[in-house]
Image (cartoon, rainbow, N blue to C red):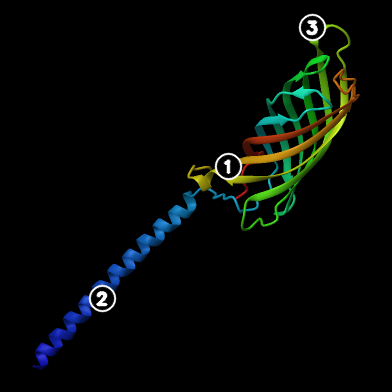
């Protein structure tokens, strides 16, 4: 009986030693795999993370322009490009140039107008760690290049001011399943824009104040300029 008991404990000890050795080998393999994964993993970016790198943001835009003192303006397609810097997770500053398009004009001595705009924007993220959305406000200068009907007479080029307010959202490519080690984001925003310039329109009102109430929808990419530092 004692011999059998001794054999039992000996076999149990050998089995426990083998089992512990197997566990140790498995843990070592897992540790090596995890370590290799950590060394080869690309930097992860998401929509709620704060990326302090400066960036460039090329965007396409569609503008729905209101009437101006009896003159009717057609909707336009254009584009914009911004250069920005996130100063904190709550605030980003931008400079931008915007080509609002070549808008046809009805009810005026002018046939169309090309609109170039450039200015400064402030982007405020109220809940940066919960929602990738922001409010914005801008102010800048507009360049209006008018084309007269038939090309006859003076075709003025006038400078005016504008302001706008709006809101937007920024979604990292990684959040929609696109692998991206650089940190590029999709970006879309709405802007309500008010632009003014003094020019004789020759419209029904004969006013010399050319005011545009416009609704802009912009979509594009936000691309960091510097490489990731992590």
Residue under the image location 13 percent in, 89 percent down: 5
Q: Residue furthest front?
A: 204
In this view, 201 is above or below 41 = above
In screen coordinates, is 123 left or right of 41?
Answer: right
Distance CA(mark 3)–CA(mark 1): 51 Å
Disc assigned to residue 17: 2
Q: Are marks 2 and 1 in contact (CB under 8 Å)?
A: no
Q: Secondary structure at mark 3?
A: helix
Q: Quadrant of residue 112?
A: top right
Q: Upstream in the sequence, badge 3 or badge 1?
A: 3
- Residue 150 image offset from top left, x and y in percent: 79, 6
Q: Residues within 10 Å of mark 3 (few under 14, many from 20)?
A: few
Q: Which residue is mark 1?
A: 182
Q: Residues within 10 Å of mark 2 (few under 14, many from 20)?
A: few
Q: Quadrant of residue 144?
A: top right
Q: Quadrant of residue 207?
A: top right
């Amino acid at each position: 009986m004692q011999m059998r008991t001794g054999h039992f404990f000996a076999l149990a000890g050998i089995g426990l030693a083998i089992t512990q050795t197997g566990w140790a080998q498995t843990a070592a393999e897992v540790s090596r795999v995890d370590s290799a994964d950590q060394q080869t993993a690309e930097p992860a970016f998401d929509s709620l993370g704060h990326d302090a790198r400066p960036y460039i943001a090329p965007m396409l835009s569609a503008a729905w322009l209101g009437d101006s003192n009896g003159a009717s303006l057609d909707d336009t397609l254009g584009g914009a490009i911004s250069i920005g810097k996130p100063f904190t997770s709550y605030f980003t500053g931008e400079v931008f140039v915007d080509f609002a398009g070549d808008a046809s004009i009805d009810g005026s001595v002018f046939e169309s107008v090309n609109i170039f705009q450039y200015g400064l924007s402030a982007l405020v993220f109220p809940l940066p760690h919960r929602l990738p959305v922001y409010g914005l406000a801008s102010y800048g200068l507009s360049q209006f290049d008018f084309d007269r009907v038939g090309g006859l007479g003076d075709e003025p080029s006038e400078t005016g001011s504008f302001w706008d307010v709006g809101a937007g959202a920024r979604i990292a490519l990684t959040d929609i399943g696109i692998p991206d080690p650089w940190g590029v984001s999709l970006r879309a925003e709405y802007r309500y824009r008010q632009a003014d310039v003094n020019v004789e329109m020759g419209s029904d009102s004969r006013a010399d104040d050319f005011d545009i109430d416009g609704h802009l929808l912009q979509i594009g990419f936000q691309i960091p300029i510097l490489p990731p530092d992590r």
